[in-house]
Image (cartoon, helix red, strand yellow):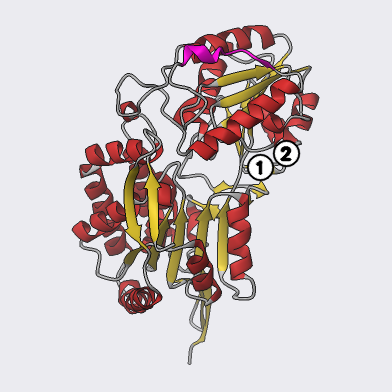
Amino acid sequence: MTKLTCVSPIDGSIFAERELDSRATIDQQLTAAGIAQKAWASRSVNERAEIVKKAIAALEAMNDEIVVEIAQMMGRPVRYGGEIGGVKERAYHMCSIAEETLKPIVIEESDQFLRYIAKEPVGIVLVVAPWNYPYLTAVNSIAPALCAGNAVVLKHATQTILAGERFKQAFAQAGLPEGLFTNLFLSHDMSSQLIADKSFGFINFTGSVAGGKAIETAAAGTFSSVGLELGGKDPGYVRADADIDAAVDTLVDGAMFNSGQCCCGIERIYVHETLFDTFVEKAVAIVEGYRLGDPLDETSTLGPMAHKRFADEVRAQISEAVEQGATPLIDPSLFTRDNGKDAYLAPQILVDVDHSMRVMIDESFGPVVGIMKVSGDEEAVKLMNDSEFGLTASIWSKDAEAVQSIGRRIETGTIFMNRCDYLDPALCWTGCKSTGRGASLSVLGFDSVTRPKSYHLKKS
């Protein structure tokens, strides 16, 4: 393979192609990045943060074009206006806390000693970004890495191949010195080779579990730091005291937005038996009101999935579940764009489901959700923990103390109460089990892109 090809899910046509970078070109750019990083690290944190913010402003100025490109590359409807709001929120927050967070930790400053722990940049940070939120996911690492004094190399997903070029364009407009941001077109094999060659001080990967294993394998023995955000099967739990209307509206949106292709999207819902029938009735009414169509059409509320093979996997999970006794509640004929042959897929709600079905335990990453009736907290906690993944869990209740108590028992990275499918940049974004390891955003987001360096100075 000498080219990376983005096939548009809208019609199956080739939307964009890029030649793979040669090893000679890559080595030249990595050398330039290393040289530029040393000078960049000597500048103040505030100087670095200001340039990052200027780059985000430059991205915002491109947003009208970017929104259309996202629709063409991965199918998200243009009506939702892209990702720049979240990109700004995350990047600006990380810039705002950078100076304070990156200050040395002073242990002693006396007549006899100066002892402190400095936070040094790791050098070159590799960001391997996914297609589902091509700007939001990438900025989580790019902003703190540059603020901390590192150079950044971005390898973006082929499905959203233009996103890396947009970042590069924005940083150039912001006045970022040459070499500090590099957008590379790499094969999986070349990525692994570069990691194995100790080219990077930190590697951040967002993607599949299989991809995360490949990254860890490549990094084995290099002692390079790795951050991984991998699969998810995020649950929602509606307690007996929940606001039923708010729960239905938010959880259904959390399951179906972006055609279900959200890292922290809701993939399974557990509802207290006293609310179950009402919840399901309201959920069906919401989904039946969606419009599946061309994402370039402002009236479309659901677009195609990013690729036909992703849609086929969700179709397979639904079909298997129905064969095992699940009941589908959405009539696919309501969504005429779904012909069963391409990336367009009608949304589906399943009841009479259980954890013997793949749709309730394997990552679906599509517009389908199974809803189960539960008797109370004990059963809900058991089911929520019955997963190899642990990214977020959403609990709906009026009792914050009860939610915190339940939260302490759930194996996950984030506990939401009365909301879901959101990243608060002031809180650590992390996961457990097969969801991966590491932390991004918040003050902890700077830990992976810096290394501690101790100073023990005895004064004369």
Residue 329 is one of the magenta-drawn residues: yes
**In the image, residue 327 above or below residue 184:** above
Instruction: Give the quadrant of residue 322.
Output: top right
Locate residue 293 relative to residue 280 in the image: left or right.
left
**Residues marked 2 and 1 touching at CB (< 8 Å):** yes
User: Which quarter of the image is occupied by the N terminus?
Assistant: bottom left
* In this view, 267 is above or below 460: above
Q: Nearer the viewer, residue 67 or 83?
A: 67
With 293 as the anchor, is 316 left or right in this view?
Answer: right
Span colored in magenta:
327-335
- Residue 159, given in percent of the width and then of the height, sits at 41, 47
Disc number lying in front (2 or 1):
2
**Nearer to me, 334 or 241:** 334
Q: Is residue 31 above or below residue 144?
A: below
Q: Which residue is mark 2?
A: 387
Q: Is residue 336 above or below residue 120?
A: above
Determine the CA span between mark 2 and mark 1. 7 Å
Instruction: Write the residue at 45% across / 64% down.
Output: 126
Q: Where in the figure is residue 33, as x and y percent of width and height?
A: 34, 74
Q: At 33% from the left edge and 53% from the top edge, which residue is drawn?
A: 17
Identify the element where label 2 is drawn: loop
Asked if one can make out residue 57 in the rendered structure from this viewpoint, the answer is yes
- Mark 1: secondary structure: strand
Question: Is residue 294 found inside the magenta-colored segment of the image?
Answer: no
Q: Mark 1 Cα within 10 Å, few/some/many (few <14, many 20+)? A: many
- Disc 2 marks a residue whose amino acid type is Ser
Residue 317, position as x, y percentages in the image: 65, 30
Q: State the mark number for residue 364.
A: none
Q: Residue at x 71, y 33 (%)?
A: 358
Residue under label 1, please give it.
Answer: 390
